[in-house]
Image: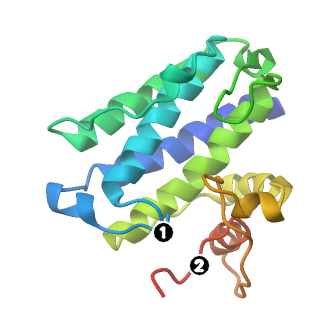
Amino acid sequence: MGADADLVALDALAVRASIELVSHVTTADLTKPTPCADWTLHGLLTHMIAQHYGFAAASRGEGDPALWKPRRLGEDPAESYRAAAEHVIAAFAEDGVPERKFPLPEFTTAFEFSGAQAIGFHFIDYVVHSWDVARTLGRTVSFEDRLLAAALVVAEAVPDGKARLAPGAAFAPEIAWSGDSTLDEIVAILGRSPNWPH
Protein backbone atom coordinates (compact mmCIF):
# COMPACT_ATOMS: atom_id res chain seq x y z
CA MET A 1 0.00 0.00 0.00
CA GLY A 2 1.43 3.39 -0.97
CA ALA A 3 1.76 6.25 1.49
CA ASP A 4 -1.25 8.14 0.10
CA ALA A 5 -3.48 5.06 0.09
CA ASP A 6 -2.33 4.31 3.64
CA LEU A 7 -3.33 7.83 4.70
CA VAL A 8 -6.82 7.28 3.28
CA ALA A 9 -7.06 4.04 5.25
CA LEU A 10 -5.82 5.68 8.45
CA ASP A 11 -8.26 8.55 8.02
CA ALA A 12 -11.10 6.03 7.70
CA LEU A 13 -9.98 4.34 10.93
CA ALA A 14 -9.99 7.67 12.78
CA VAL A 15 -13.43 8.57 11.43
CA ARG A 16 -14.84 5.15 12.31
CA ALA A 17 -13.57 5.60 15.86
CA SER A 18 -15.53 8.85 16.00
CA ILE A 19 -18.66 7.09 14.70
CA GLU A 20 -18.43 4.56 17.51
CA LEU A 21 -18.00 7.27 20.13
CA VAL A 22 -20.83 9.43 18.81
CA SER A 23 -23.13 6.38 18.84
CA HIS A 24 -23.19 6.74 22.64
CA VAL A 25 -24.34 10.39 22.60
CA THR A 26 -27.68 11.12 24.25
CA THR A 27 -29.77 14.27 24.02
CA ALA A 28 -28.66 15.16 27.53
CA ASP A 29 -25.01 15.07 26.42
CA LEU A 30 -25.46 17.76 23.77
CA THR A 31 -25.11 20.66 26.23
CA LYS A 32 -21.88 19.34 27.77
CA PRO A 33 -18.69 21.40 27.40
CA THR A 34 -15.93 19.94 25.23
CA PRO A 35 -12.14 20.37 25.03
CA CYS A 36 -12.93 22.75 22.13
CA ALA A 37 -13.46 25.82 24.29
CA ASP A 38 -15.97 27.52 21.99
CA TRP A 39 -18.27 24.51 21.59
CA THR A 40 -20.69 22.37 23.51
CA LEU A 41 -20.97 18.82 22.23
CA HIS A 42 -23.85 19.98 20.02
CA GLY A 43 -21.63 22.62 18.43
CA LEU A 44 -18.74 20.20 18.04
CA LEU A 45 -20.92 17.61 16.30
CA THR A 46 -22.39 20.16 13.88
CA HIS A 47 -18.83 21.30 13.09
CA MET A 48 -17.65 17.72 12.53
CA ILE A 49 -20.60 16.95 10.25
CA ALA A 50 -20.02 20.14 8.23
CA GLN A 51 -16.35 19.27 7.84
CA HIS A 52 -17.15 15.77 6.58
CA TYR A 53 -19.48 17.11 3.90
CA GLY A 54 -17.09 19.96 3.06
CA PHE A 55 -14.07 17.71 2.60
CA ALA A 56 -16.13 15.21 0.58
CA ALA A 57 -17.24 18.03 -1.73
CA ALA A 58 -13.66 19.25 -2.02
CA SER A 59 -12.56 15.76 -3.08
CA ARG A 60 -14.88 16.20 -6.07
CA GLY A 61 -13.40 19.62 -6.87
CA GLU A 62 -16.38 21.54 -5.48
CA GLY A 63 -15.31 24.78 -3.81
CA ASP A 64 -18.59 26.48 -2.85
CA PRO A 65 -18.23 27.76 0.77
CA ALA A 66 -21.92 26.99 1.34
CA LEU A 67 -21.04 23.30 1.25
CA TRP A 68 -19.17 23.79 4.56
CA LYS A 69 -22.04 25.40 6.46
CA PRO A 70 -23.34 23.64 9.60
CA ARG A 71 -26.46 21.51 9.26
CA ARG A 72 -29.14 20.77 11.84
CA LEU A 73 -28.43 17.67 13.87
CA GLY A 74 -31.97 16.35 13.53
CA GLU A 75 -33.78 14.05 15.91
CA ASP A 76 -31.03 11.43 15.95
CA PRO A 77 -27.64 13.14 16.28
CA ALA A 78 -25.73 9.86 16.17
CA GLU A 79 -27.37 8.86 12.90
CA SER A 80 -26.82 12.32 11.40
CA TYR A 81 -23.18 12.04 12.32
CA ARG A 82 -22.82 8.49 11.02
CA ALA A 83 -24.29 9.46 7.64
CA ALA A 84 -21.85 12.37 7.25
CA ALA A 85 -18.90 10.27 8.34
CA GLU A 86 -19.72 7.41 5.97
CA HIS A 87 -20.15 9.99 3.19
CA VAL A 88 -16.60 11.30 3.52
CA ILE A 89 -15.10 7.83 3.96
CA ALA A 90 -16.71 6.80 0.67
CA ALA A 91 -15.62 10.01 -1.06
CA PHE A 92 -11.97 9.58 -0.05
CA ALA A 93 -12.00 5.90 -1.04
CA GLU A 94 -12.64 6.67 -4.72
CA ASP A 95 -9.77 6.00 -7.11
CA GLY A 96 -7.22 8.75 -7.49
CA VAL A 97 -8.47 11.04 -4.72
CA PRO A 98 -5.02 11.72 -3.21
CA GLU A 99 -3.84 12.95 -6.61
CA ARG A 100 -6.72 15.41 -7.02
CA LYS A 101 -6.70 19.10 -6.14
CA PHE A 102 -8.93 20.07 -3.20
CA PRO A 103 -10.48 23.55 -2.93
CA LEU A 104 -10.71 24.27 0.81
CA PRO A 105 -12.44 27.64 1.16
CA GLU A 106 -12.44 27.37 4.95
CA PHE A 107 -8.64 27.49 4.81
CA THR A 108 -7.99 29.81 1.83
CA THR A 109 -9.38 30.69 -1.56
CA ALA A 110 -5.95 31.71 -2.87
CA PHE A 111 -5.00 28.21 -4.00
CA GLU A 112 -6.04 24.56 -3.88
CA PHE A 113 -4.38 21.82 -1.84
CA SER A 114 -3.10 18.47 -2.95
CA GLY A 115 -5.43 15.62 -2.12
CA ALA A 116 -2.83 14.01 0.12
CA GLN A 117 -2.37 17.24 2.09
CA ALA A 118 -6.13 17.77 2.44
CA ILE A 119 -6.68 14.20 3.62
CA GLY A 120 -3.90 14.79 6.14
CA PHE A 121 -5.79 17.79 7.49
CA HIS A 122 -8.97 15.72 7.82
CA PHE A 123 -7.08 12.83 9.39
CA ILE A 124 -5.49 14.84 12.19
CA ASP A 125 -8.82 16.59 12.85
CA TYR A 126 -10.58 13.29 13.43
CA VAL A 127 -7.89 11.81 15.61
CA VAL A 128 -8.23 14.90 17.80
CA HIS A 129 -12.02 15.20 17.52
CA SER A 130 -12.41 11.54 18.47
CA TRP A 131 -10.42 12.35 21.59
CA ASP A 132 -12.59 15.45 22.15
CA VAL A 133 -15.80 13.42 22.01
CA ALA A 134 -14.37 10.66 24.20
CA ARG A 135 -13.34 13.14 26.89
CA THR A 136 -16.68 14.92 26.73
CA LEU A 137 -18.51 11.64 27.30
CA GLY A 138 -16.11 10.38 29.97
CA ARG A 139 -14.94 7.60 27.66
CA THR A 140 -11.58 6.62 26.23
CA VAL A 141 -10.43 6.21 22.66
CA SER A 142 -7.44 4.21 21.52
CA PHE A 143 -5.74 3.92 18.16
CA GLU A 144 -3.21 1.46 16.81
CA ASP A 145 0.44 2.44 16.93
CA ARG A 146 0.84 3.00 13.17
CA LEU A 147 -2.07 5.45 13.16
CA LEU A 148 -0.65 7.37 16.11
CA ALA A 149 2.79 7.48 14.53
CA ALA A 150 1.34 8.97 11.35
CA ALA A 151 -0.83 11.42 13.32
CA LEU A 152 2.17 12.61 15.33
CA VAL A 153 4.04 13.46 12.11
CA VAL A 154 1.05 15.48 10.89
CA ALA A 155 0.57 17.21 14.25
CA GLU A 156 4.22 18.24 14.40
CA ALA A 157 3.90 19.78 10.93
CA VAL A 158 1.00 22.08 11.93
CA PRO A 159 2.37 25.64 12.13
CA ASP A 160 2.55 27.05 15.66
CA GLY A 161 2.77 30.70 16.67
CA LYS A 162 0.44 33.69 16.61
CA ALA A 163 -1.85 32.19 13.96
CA ARG A 164 -3.17 29.81 16.60
CA LEU A 165 -4.37 32.76 18.69
CA ALA A 166 -6.54 34.14 15.89
CA PRO A 167 -10.34 33.87 16.18
CA GLY A 168 -11.53 30.62 14.63
CA ALA A 169 -8.05 29.05 14.58
CA ALA A 170 -8.25 25.29 14.16
CA PHE A 171 -5.87 24.64 17.06
CA ALA A 172 -4.75 26.52 20.17
CA PRO A 173 -1.05 27.04 20.92
CA GLU A 174 0.94 23.97 21.98
CA ILE A 175 0.89 23.32 25.71
CA ALA A 176 3.47 21.79 28.02
CA TRP A 177 3.08 18.05 28.42
CA SER A 178 4.90 15.05 29.87
CA GLY A 179 4.25 11.33 29.79
CA ASP A 180 4.52 8.39 27.42
CA SER A 181 1.15 8.49 25.62
CA THR A 182 1.47 9.37 21.93
CA LEU A 183 -2.18 10.42 21.78
CA ASP A 184 -1.67 12.77 24.74
CA GLU A 185 1.41 14.17 22.99
CA ILE A 186 -0.62 14.80 19.82
CA VAL A 187 -3.44 16.63 21.59
CA ALA A 188 -0.95 18.70 23.60
CA ILE A 189 0.91 19.73 20.43
CA LEU A 190 -2.44 20.88 19.08
CA GLY A 191 -3.39 22.90 22.16
CA ARG A 192 -5.51 20.54 24.23
CA SER A 193 -4.73 19.57 27.80
CA PRO A 194 -4.35 15.78 28.02
CA ASN A 195 -5.85 16.15 31.51
CA TRP A 196 -8.95 18.02 30.35
CA PRO A 197 -11.11 19.29 32.01
CA HIS A 198 -8.35 20.11 34.51
Q: Which mark is residue 11?
A: none
Callout 2 secondary element: loop
Please state if 27 lies on the left or on the right of 157 as rendered.
Answer: left
Q: CA distance from mark 1 to mark 2?
A: 8 Å
Q: How is the image coloured?
A: rainbow
Q: Quadrant of residue 86?
A: top left
Residue at (18% x, 56% y) in the render: 26
* Percent x, y of residue 54: 54, 26
**What's the amino acid at mark 1?**
Pro
Nearer-N-terminus badge (1/2): 1
Q: Is residue 68 visible?
A: yes
Q: Residue at x 66, y 49 (%)?
A: 124
Dot 1 lies on which element? loop
79 lies above or below 195: above
Using the rendered view, name the quadrant where residue 192 is placed. Answer: bottom right
The amino acid sitting under disc 2 is Ser
Give the class, few, some or many, for how many residues have Cα within 10 Å of label 2's Cα (few <14, many ≥20).
some
Q: Is residue 1 visible?
A: no
**What is the residue that sits farthest to the front in this orientation?**
167
Percent position (x, y) of residue 140?
43, 69
- The residue sitting at 75% across, 24% down in the picture is 109
Q: Do tag 1 and tag 2 residues touch (Cβ < 8 Å)?
A: yes
Tell me what residue is drawn at x 63 percent, y 16 percent.
Answer: 63
Task: Give the image location of residue 147, x and y in percent.
Answer: 67, 52
Question: Is 117 rendered above or below residue 178?
Answer: above
Instruction: Give coordinates of residue 195: x percent, y percent.
Output: 53, 84
Closer-to-camera residue (126/73)? 73
Q: Which residue is mark 1?
A: 35
**For mark 2, what is the residue?**
193
